[in-house]
Image (tube, grey):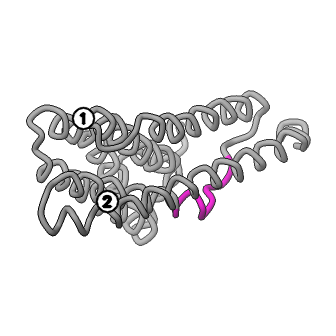
Amino acid sequence: MSQPATSADRVLTVPNLLSVLRLLGVPLFLWLLLGPHADGWALLVLALSGITDWADGVLARKLDQLSRLGALLDPLADRLYILATLVGLVLRQVIPWELAVVLVGRDVVLAGALAVLRRAGWGPPDVHYLGKAATFCLLYAFPLLLLGVHGGTLGAVAKPIAWAFTIWGTALYLWAGAVYLLQVVSLMRSPPPRAAS
């Protein structure tokens, strides 16, 4: 007889459904940004993504619905929104392509490091508060950068704030990446979990 799924193994949970909705919003957001240049609707999708990102974490804790799938989906949605926004902003010539390369390059390096960890029998290192702060800054920076493209008072006010968030977010993103790499090196120098057990 099969064992009942523990809370960590559950798939159909409210937070996971919210994360799936966030993922479905990524192509819609990119199309709105690049197709009709419907920036207002694109910003609405981005705002709803931020709200559901906050809600799925709160609900997971309140409903005791923390799960392994949720722990994968949530950062995946964050990374995809960042990637989609970078692609859109580069193609719209709002940000230089070099900035996008730096941010995406950091994620590529960390993905390689995680693959090495998995082969050695380790899971991913714990999420660091620096990474959360960096994502927070960038997810505020991107809509403000888009607002800054438009003329008028709102655009003039949004632009310097957007670049402040962009610079801080990029610095924190790289710093968090360095912290994760140090964690990876530390784990790789330890006996693998299989050997330790």
Tell me if 132 is positioned left or right of 148 in this view: right
Q: Position of residue 39 (x, y in %)?
A: 14, 48
Q: Quadrant of the C terminus?
A: top right
Specify start and end residues of the magenta stretch as a single range.
125-133
Residues at marks 2 and 1 touching, judged by CB atoms closer than 8 Å: no
Q: Nearer the viewer, residue 143 or 44?
A: 143
Q: Is residue 126 magenta?
A: yes
Q: Which residue is mark 1?
A: 27
Q: Is residue 118 above or below residue 127?
A: above
Q: Position of residue 97 (x, y in %)?
A: 42, 34
Q: Residues within 10 Å of mark 1 (few under 14, many from 20)?
A: few
Q: Position of residue 56 (x, y in %)?
A: 36, 60
What secondary structure is marked by label 1? Answer: helix
Q: Nearer the viewer, residue 149 or 187?
A: 149
Q: Position of residue 142 (x, y in %)?
A: 33, 53
Q: Which residue is mark 2?
A: 50
Residue type marked 2: Gly
